[in-house]
Image (tube, rainbow, N blue to C red):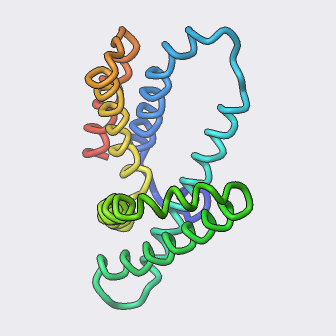
Amino acid sequence: MGSFFFSEYLSVFGWVMVIFSVLGIIILTIPKLKTQQKINLLPTMIGLFSGLCFAISTICVAKAVSGIDGGDLFLNVGICLFLVLTFQSLILLVFLLLKNKKDIKVLYKKRYKSIFLGFFGGLASICWFSAFCLINPALVKTIGSVEMIFTVIMGYVFFNDRLGFYEYLGMVVIIVSSLGVLYA
C-alpha cells in the first residue's frame, strides 16, 4: 500500500519476501480448507477487506507520526497512538450503545483486567508504531507474521491441535521470509 499511495520504495527482494510471507500464511490455512464441506467466500472477503484497511491505517499512522514536528519519536508515536485509541474506543462505544448495551456492563465489571491488558497492549502498539516509522511498514508486517507461528504452537500446546505437513511447511516459509526481510 505504501508503494501505491506514498511512493515508498521496497526492493525486489523485499517484495519477494513479503509475498513469500503471505504464501506461508496461506499454506497454514490449507488444512482448514480441506476440512470444510463448502467454502464460504464472505469471511474471506471480510478478511481481505480488513487486511486492506489495516494496511492503509498502518501507513497513515506512520505518515502521521513522521508529520509531527519536533519531539522524540516515542513521544510522537504516543501522541498519535493516544488519538487512534481514543477514536477506536469512541467508535466501539457507539457501536455497543446501538447494538448491545449489555456488553458495556460486562466490560465495566471487568474494567481492572481491561485496564491492565490495555496498558500492555498500548506498550506493544507503541513498539509497532515506532517500527513502522523507522523502516518500511511492509517489512515490519512481514517480520510480524512470525506471530502466526506462535498462534499455531499455542494451539498445539493448549488445545492439542495436531500439526501436519502444511503447518510445518507454512511455519518454515514464514521463518525464511522473516529472516530474508532482515537483508531486504
Say if 43 sits above or below 102 in the image: above
Residue 10 locus on image (x, y percent): 44, 52
Say if 179 sits above or below 125 in the image: above
In the image, 3 versus 35, the foreground residue is 35
Quarter-of-image position of residue 146: top left
Residue 42 visible here:
yes
| In the image: residue 65, left or right of residue 174 | right
Quadrant position of the N terminus in the picture: bottom right
Residue 19 locus on image (x, y percent): 47, 35
**Residue drawn 43% across the image and 36% down it:** 16
Quarter-of-image position of residue 122: bottom left
In the image, 129 versus 135, the foreground residue is 129
**Residue drawn 67% across the image and 40% down it:** 46
In the image, 178 versus 158, the foreground residue is 158
**Residue drawn 29% across the image and 76% down it:** 74
| In the image: residue 81, left or right of residue 5 | left
Residue 119 locus on image (x, y percent): 32, 66
Say if 104 sits above or below 64 in the image: above
In the image, 132 versus 183, the foreground residue is 132
Residue 168 visible here:
no
**Residue drawn 45% across the image and 42% down it:** 15
Count of numbered labels shown in the rendering: 0
Which residue is situated farthest in the bottom direction here? 70
| In the image: residue 91, left or right of residue 181 | right
